[in-house]
Image: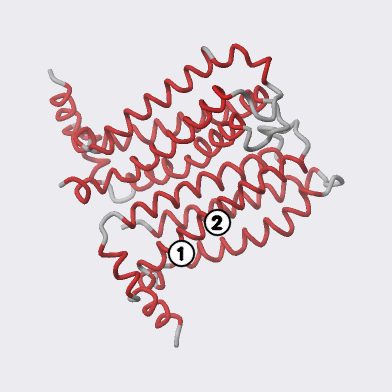
């Protein structure tokens, strides 16, 4: 079974049809998805700006990360949950949508950026934890995070507008 | 000129007619509006969660609030500039939408509240625990009304 035929099967399940045809449920899920941006991307933005040395320069990077991580992770779980429900409502349309594909690709890149930060860059954290502006490679990771989240929000917002751009 | 006539005049001014004829300008401005949402959301939460004893709760309040206030101002500027453009695109439609007026009222209220009562409590080193929690709670509640109102305006 190809991935597309799996998605076609998924689109025929009663849950998917119910969500797709619902008067309010889809809009509620979308609202949760958009408003959780404040928690997830809002908090990530503050951490990334700290890595850039642009805000909270008197707070150590490790404190920013450990104290805000529970909120960022909870926000991320809500984002993925509500996002998955929206995908489930119209899996084939989403799969064929170029903005959706771009968004998924950039999400992987954002994940790689975070992985590089925690696996490689943060090894030397004791040297720059208290620096008002961390070294250039750390600032680059923070900057890349901000650019990627902005691009992901943009691609997500454009998903319903595919026909204006490409068709 | 009544308010509705004024909105009509704005909506059908040459610039706005031009803007609506572009298929991509509205979603692009709406996207930048979301950047504002994220900036405001982050800077509001960092201070209000602190006041409620979460997040950066060990940091000195005044310094944290000063840092966050700069970000908040950037966020508010992005929101007002893009929000005004979004509003002008369909001003006469919004005139009849209850969520629009609710949002606008809550927005004016939260901006005044943030820079008067909220600010006074945050900048006062003698603040009580009760006053900290009540201003944080009020601020979060008002911003949620503003955000939900905004979301409802866009509903079909």
**Residue A87, image x and y in percent?**
28, 34
Q: CA distance from mark 2 to mark 1?
A: 11 Å
The residue identified by callout 1 is: B84
Q: Quadrant of residue A99?
A: top left
Residue indicated by mark 2: B77
Residue B77 image point, x, y percent: 55, 56
Residue shown at 79%/43% (left/top)?
B129
Which quarter of the rendered picture does the N terminus of chain B lie within?
bottom left
As rendered, which of A22 and A111 lies closer to the eye?
A111
Between B17 and B112, the one lying in front of the other is B17
On the picture, is B30 further left or further right than A6? Answer: right
Q: Residues within 10 Å of mark 1 (few under 14, many from 20)?
A: few
Say which quadrant the C terminus of chain B sits in. Answer: bottom left
| Residue at left offset 70%, top offset 39% | B52
User: Which badge, 2 or 1, is on the more N-terminal residue?
Assistant: 2
Q: In front here: A18 or B121?
A: B121
Does B16 sit left or right of B41 as displayed?
A: left
Q: As drawn, which residue projects farthest toward the bottom?
A: B1
Could you tell me which residue is drawn at 16 percent across and 33 percent down? A12
Look at the picture and state if B153 lies above or below A146. below
Residue A62 placement, left or right of B75:
right
> Picture coordinates of residue A105 (x, y %)?
32, 28
User: Under tag 2, what secondary structure?
Assistant: helix
Using the image, name the chain to which the residue with label 1 belongs: B
Per the rendering, the mark at residue A46 is none
**Residues at marks 2 and 1 on the same chain:** yes
Compared with A150, B100 (above or below) is: below
Give the class, few, some or many, for how many residues have Cα within 10 Å of label 2's Cα (few <14, many ≥20).
Answer: some
Horizontal and vertical percent position of residue B48? 67, 43
- Chain identifier of the residue bearing label 2 in the image: B
């Amino acid at each position: 079974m190809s991935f597309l035929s799996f998605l076609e099967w998924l689109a025929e399940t009663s849950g998917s049809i119910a969500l797709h045809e619902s008067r309010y449920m889809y809009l509620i899920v979308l609202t949760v998805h958009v408003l959780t941006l404040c928690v997830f991307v809002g908090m990530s933005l503050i951490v990334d700006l700290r890595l850039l040395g642009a805000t909270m320069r008197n707070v150590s990077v490790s404190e920013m990360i450990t104290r805000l991580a529970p909120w960022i992770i909870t926000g991320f779980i809500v984002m993925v949950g509500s996002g998955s429900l929206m995908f489930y409502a119209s899996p084939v349309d989403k799969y064929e949508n170029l903005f959706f594909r771009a968004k998924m690709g950039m999400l992987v890149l954002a994940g790689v950026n975070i992985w590089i930060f925690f696996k490689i860059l943060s090894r030397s954290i004791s040297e720059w934890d208290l620096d008002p502006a961390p070294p250039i490679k750390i600032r680059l990771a923070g900057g890349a995070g901000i650019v990627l989240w902005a691009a992901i929000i943009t691609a997500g917002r454009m998903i319903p507008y595919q026909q204006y751009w490409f068709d | 000129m009544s308010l509705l006539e004024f909105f009509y005049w704005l909506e059908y001014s040459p610039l706005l007619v031009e803007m609506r004829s572009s298929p991509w300008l509205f979603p692009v401005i709406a996207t930048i509006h979301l950047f504002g949402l994220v900036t405001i959301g982050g800077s509001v939460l960092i201070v209000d969660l602190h006041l409620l004893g979460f997040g950066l709760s060990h940091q000195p309040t005044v310094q944290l609030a000063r840092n966050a206030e700069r970000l908040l101002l950037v966020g508010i500027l992005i929101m007002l500039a893009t929000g005004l453009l979004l509003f002008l695109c369909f001003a006469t439609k919004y005139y009849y939408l209850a969520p629009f007026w609710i949002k606008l009222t809550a927005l004016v209220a939260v901006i005044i509240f943030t820079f008067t009562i909220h600010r006074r409590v945050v900048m006062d080193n003698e603040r009580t625990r009760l006053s900290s929690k009540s201003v944080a709670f009020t601020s979060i509640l008002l911003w949620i009304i503003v955000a939900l109102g905004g979301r409802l305006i866009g509903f079909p």
